[in-house]
Image (tube, helix red, strand yellow):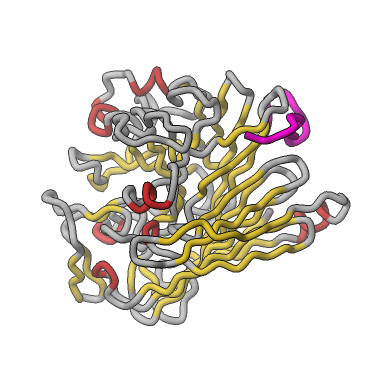
Amino acid sequence: MKCRTARADGIIFWRLTVGAIGSFLTAHALAANVSREPYGVTAAGEQVEVFTLQNDRGMRVKVLSFGGILNEIVVPDKRGSCDNVALSLPDLAAYEGRPSFSSLLGRYANRIASGGFTIDGIRYDLKSNASGVSSHGGERGFGARNWSGQPFRAGQTAGVVLEYHSADGENGFPGALVVQVRYTLDEDNSLLLEYSATTDKPTVLNLSHHVYFNLSGETTIYDHRAQVFADRYTQIDTRKVPTGRIETVAGTSLDLRRPTRLGDRIQSKDPQMALGNGFDHNFVLSKPPGAFARAARIEAPATGRILEVSTTEPGMQLYTGNGFNGSLRDDKGRPIVQGAGLALETQHFPDSPNQPSFPSTVLRPGQVFKSATQFSFEVAGQSQPGRCTAADAR
């Protein structure tokens, strides 16, 4: 997959070309499918749908219209058994009670400090915590909104396009925003998320997805081996907000340039690890601006499952579920404990609206925001994507 980029007023524009993918897929008879069903009704009376994407290898993805939640990602392991590798809650009420859980993030993924931001000399205040920090777009960010959905099939791929219209002033952000997120499943066990947005007033925008992964089915992800393709990271303070300094990972516990057991680093005495209570850091990805390239590779030795993340975004937040305490239960009734899952949030940098040295997140009328992130699943030691051999994918 290739990208072309252009820059105007500090905004990077993305356009993915699919010719290489299309020529590959047309040589195969396999095809993915999509279906839609009712999922439930929100407390406000909104009808929520679930869109099920499935390919002929047995990979299955369930996307909720509520929050764009990835409710299920079923992929094979080294034995051919298929299981859900996304942390899932029992029902819609549980998701409503836990905003941003495995959902889309916006209008601004991650944190904005200083109680808000200024564009063109105009101050915009955001509802913030006692430290002046707003997270993931506020109390009812994009992960707590019900999106409209349209399923599609294209060649041997299938997916759903979710759309949401965010009103001018919603949660304090300026501009009427039209956002689309396109989820596409292919026959290589890859899930592609493509984001686009337009606005009628200057605003700031940072879109991502907060799906939690556990590739092993074990209680925690501490045995996962992680590799992040980044030489630098944005240093955080006690509020977990960037200080503005971009530091090298060399000589720190954040050096994941080679595959590393996560638990070993989380238990270290590195000051940054102590501030995050684990990994809760934005990595500055080592790639040209705008390039669609690898951001991370995660492997679970117990199952042989491998997840590779590629993106057009300049950064990626690695979060290791440090705030879970067992009070939440998953869809099987098990307590979700600290470290139960990890999130790989591709993004622009946290607090960019207040950090002039960071890549700009300003979006202006007439511009189109576009970005893409792909989650690709493999099995260690196998040259082809995995396939379910069990009668039923659990």
Percent of width and height locating residue 265: 38, 21
Picture quarter containing residue 275? top left
Q: Main secondary structure of the magenta part?
A: loop
Q: Is residue 151 above or below residue 257?
A: below
Q: Residue furthest left?
A: 130
Left or right placement of residue 19 versus residue 47 in this view: right
Point out the stretch of residues depicted in magenta: 378-394
Image mark count: 0
Q: Is residue 315 visible?
A: no
Residue lying at 27% horizontally and 29% vertically, measured from the top left: 277
Picture quarter containing residue 306? top right
Q: Is residue 381 found inside the magenta-colored segment of the image?
A: yes
Percent of width and height locating residue 129: 16, 52
Left or right placement of residue 362 versus residue 373 in this view: left
Q: Is residue 10 above or below residue 233?
A: below
Residue lying at 75% horizontally and 32% vertically, measured from the top left: 391
Percent of width and height locating residue 381: 72, 23
Q: Is residue 226 found inside the magenta-colored segment of the image?
A: no
Left or right placement of residue 141 versus residue 342 in this view: left
Judging depth in this view, the residue of 249 and 147 nearest the camera is 147
Judging depth in this view, the residue of 42 and 164 nearest the camera is 42
Judging depth in this view, the residue of 286 and 140 nearest the camera is 140
Percent of width and height locating residue 308: 59, 38
Judging depth in this view, the residue of 264 and 358 nearest the camera is 264
Q: Is residue 33 visible?
A: yes
Could you tell me which quadrant the C terminus lies in? top right
Residue lying at 55% horizontally and 30% vertically, measured from the top left: 215
Residue lying at 79% horizontally and 61% vertically, measured from the top left: 155
Q: Is residue 267 above or below residue 305?
A: above
